[in-house]
Image (cartoon, coloured by chain):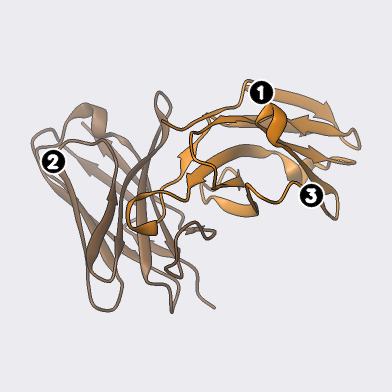
């Protein structure tokens, strides 16, 4: 069974640009969550999508947004990039019911110059 | 608000030693879930275990064991006879059942870097 797939693995952008990250969940999983990992703030929850609807949201500015498609694939978008957005962005999927183990992808490492 | 504390930033042991990673949590919910994840250098978070707040039984899985104590709000993780392959960052996480919509929102601790040397 294929795991969670995130693309691209690495990305370099400059301040002010926008970026879109992609996540394909494990087949049959309907919940997709996104996390940001930085050395200073650690792992922080961004948002969760279930059945194409945002079900939970963390404390991030509106520049961070996401969506989920009917096949459960998800994208995350960050607009007007700032230096502090440099991080490893991790996507996780789970079957759907709350509080089940989430399975993570390898992440997308975003560097802002 | 929920919080997870992993006071040990880094632990170094020699192979075959036993090591315990501490995790203390805070929550107002009576129903919650606790998790441990392992993050090797490759970056992917690997799920190790989930426990719910009503199940205080300790669990053993091979060289891994977990000690859940509600009285002290702790969920500690012990690796017996550690191996070099155990070297990784280990995260403890909390999910509250009262999360809006019954969804998934993990609050992570800051992680413990475990280094196992020969």
Q: Is residue A7 left or right of residue B49?
A: left
Q: Which residue is mark 1?
A: B10
Give how far apart the Cα atoms at labels 1 and 3 are: 27 Å
Check the image and report above or below for B52 versus A38.
below
* Residue contact at pointers 2 and 3, CB within 8 angstroms: no
For disc 2, the neighbor class at 10 Å (few under 14, some 14 to 19, many from 20) is few
Q: Which residue is mark 3?
A: B57
Chain containing the residue with disc 2: A
| Letter of the chain shown brown in the rendering | A
On the image, the x and y values in percent for residue B6 come to 60, 26
On the image, the x and y values in percent for residue B88 come to 65, 39
- Specify the colour of chain B: orange
Q: Quadrant of the N terminus of chain B?
A: top left
**Tag 1 and tag 2 share a subunit:** no
Question: Which secondary structure, mark 2?
Answer: loop
Question: Which secondary structure, mark 3?
Answer: loop
Q: Is residue B24 left or right of residue A7?
A: right
Q: Is residue A108 left or right of residue B37?
A: left
Check the image and report above or below for A12 versus B10.
below
Which residue is situated farthest in the front direction here?
B30
Q: Which residue is mark 2?
A: A63
Residue in the picture at 43% in, 63% down: A93
Q: Residue B62, located in which quarter of the rendered image?
A: bottom right
Question: Marks 1 and 2: which is nearer the front?
Answer: 2
Chain containing the residue with disc 1: B
């Amino acid at each position: 069974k294929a795991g969670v797939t995130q693309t691209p693995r690495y990305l370099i952008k400059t301040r002010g640009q926008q970026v879109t990250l992609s996540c394909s969940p494990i087949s049959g999983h309907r919940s997709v969550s996104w996390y940001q990992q930085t050395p200073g703030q650690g792992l922080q929850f961004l948002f969760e999508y279930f059945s194409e609807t945002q079900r939970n949201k963390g404390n991030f500015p509106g520049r961070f947004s996401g969506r989920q498609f009917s096949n459960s694939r998800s994208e995350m978008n960050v607009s007007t990039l700032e230096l502090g957005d440099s991080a490893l962005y991790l996507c996780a999927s789970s079957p759907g019911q709350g509080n089940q183990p989430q399975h993570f992808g390898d992440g997308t490492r975003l560097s802002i110059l | 608000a929920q919080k997870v504390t992993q006071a040990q930033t880094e632990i170094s042991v020699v192979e075959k030693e036993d090591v315990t990673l501490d995790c203390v949590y805070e929550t107002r919910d009576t129903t919650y879930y606790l998790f441990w994840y392992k993050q090797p250098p490759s970056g992917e978070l690997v799920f190790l275990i989930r426990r719910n707040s009503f199940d205080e039984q300790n669990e053993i899985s091979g060289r891994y064991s977990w000690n859940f104590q509600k009285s002290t709000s702790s969920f500690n993780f012990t690796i017996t006879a550690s191996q070099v392959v155990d070297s990784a960052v280990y995260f403890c996480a909390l999910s509250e059942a009262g999360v809006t919509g019954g969804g998934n929102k993990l609050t992570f601790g800051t992680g413990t870097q475990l280094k196992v040397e020969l």
